[in-house]
Amino acid sequence: MAIKISYYSDILCIWAYIAQARVDAVKRDFGGSVDLDFRFCSVFGDAQTKLADAWRGRDGLAGYNRHVLSIAERFPHARVNPDVWLATQPASSMSPHLFLKAVMEWERTDSDDGQEVVDLPVFERVTWALRRGFFQECRDICRREVQWELASPFKIDAVAIEELINDGTAFASLSADYQHAEEARIEGSPTFVLNEGRQKFYGNVGFRVIDANVRELLRDPESDQASWC
């Protein structure tokens, strides 16, 4: 039986962008032994107001830009455009989250209909394309035309995606994510949740910590005790 890991993130969060390497490592090292459940939480739901309030008196967006770049400097694998948050200021992460939930629901339906799943799931590839589009290219990923442009290489069904948004399915899925995040008391992005909520790893947590806890759960998956790692 695979160990379930719920992974909460906000697509505009620099720490979640950096943590993609840890997500990739979990998938690489544990393969089918883990079941990654990707969910969104709302950190930048009102991005411009959040940053204006948080960085008032600290040089505003210019100060936040320097903060993000100083974080990225510590992680050579994470390429960040020097003009991030200056050249483009997305209004809300809810827009790309909604689009990505539609992609997730479409892919799930196709898989249920018997379509063979190969390589990395489309949802994960499109999610990374949007993250990279913002942090590396300063694209406004709140805009639907930008979302479609970044997703176009992955051959998703545009009609089906738009219908999943128009009929409320994607909204319901995103609302469920936000509700689950609140119920699980998710403090921020990114957060790994293991062992039915007993273990949470939030923010800049090293891969070795995650690795040790996953291995302990795989060693004794029926235990009701929290890991000692």
Image (cartoon, rainbow, N blue to C red):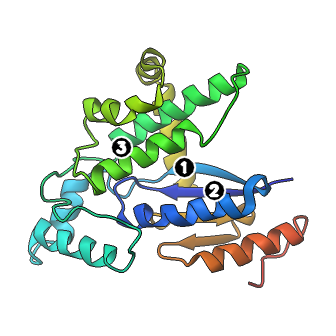
SS for dot 2: strand
Above or below 213: residue 106: above
Above or below 202: residue 182: above
Quadrant assignment for the C terminus: bottom right
Residue at 26% across / 71% down in the picture? 68
Residue type, label 2: Ser
Residue type, label 3: Met
Q: Are marks 1 and 2 in contact (CB under 8 Å)?
A: yes
Residue 119, percent across and down?
63, 40
Q: Are marks 1 and 3 in contact (CB under 8 Å)?
A: no
Q: Nearer the viewer, residue 196 or 71?
A: 71
Q: Quadrant of residue 5?
A: bottom right
Image mark for residue 6: 2
Label 1 belongs to which residue?
Answer: 39
SS for dot 3: helix
Q: Is residue 185 visible to us here?
A: no
Residue type, label 1: Arg
SS for dot 1: strand
Residue 60, percent across and down?
11, 69
Query: Which mark is first along the chain, 3 or 1?
Result: 1
Q: CA distance from mark 3 to mark 2?
A: 19 Å
Q: Quadrant of residue 127?
A: top left
Image mark for residue 94: 3
